[in-house]
Amino acid sequence: MRVTVKLFGEFREAAGRERVELELPAGATCQEALRRLSELLPEVGGLLFDREGRLRDHLHVFLNGRNVAAFGGLSARLSDGDSVTFFPPIGGG
């Protein structure tokens, strides 16, 4: 199946592009998609995962515009044509 990962901010800068198309096996999870992305683009992987290989806890991951925390977290299953996005919380003042 094919999944689109949309990149924003520092992730877009690190990758040098706005989106990446991933080919994944049927039933892959958000976690598997992010791991695959980090294999393809190690410079992005360094921003996604800490030294122990855990997703950095300040990141928000969305599947088709909805926070994955609302439906299974990173173990949420993907379908062909899905879109995954992630970014750190926005701060300001």
Image (cartoon, grey):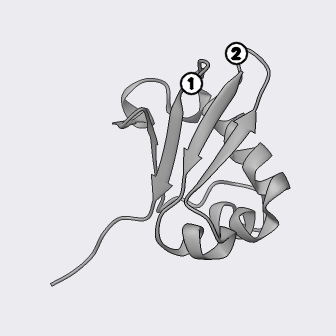
Which circle, 1 or 2, is nearer the viewer? 1
Name, please, the residue furthest toward the left.
93
Tell whether 14 sits left or right of 36.
left
Labels 1 & 2 near each other (Cβ < 8 A) = no
Distance between mark 1 and mark 2 Cα atoms: 12 Å
Secondary structure under badge 1? loop
Tell whether 91 sits left or right of 82.
left
* Residue 64 lies in quadrant: top left
Q: Residue at x 78, y 44 (%)?
A: 36
Q: Is residue 24 above or below residue 58?
A: above
> What percent of the width, then of the height, locates residue 54?
69, 54
Q: Amino acid at mark 1?
A: Gly
- Please state, as top left, top right, bottom left or bottom right, where the C terminus lies in the image: bottom left
Tell whether 79 sits left or right of 34.
left
Mark 1 highlights which residue? 81
- Please state, as top left, top right, bottom left or bottom right, where the N terminus lies in the image: top right
Q: Residue at x 47, y 62 (%)?
A: 58
> What percent of the width, then of the height, locates residue 16?
65, 71
Residue 27 numbered tag: 2
Q: Amino acid at mark 2?
A: Gly
* Residue 78 lies in quadrant: top right
Q: Nearer the viewer, residue 82 or 75?
A: 82
Name, please, the residue furthest toward the bottom.
93
Q: Earlier in the sequence, mark 1 or mark 2?
A: 2
Local packing at callout 1 (Cα closer than 10 Å; few below 14, some 14-19, many 20+) is: few
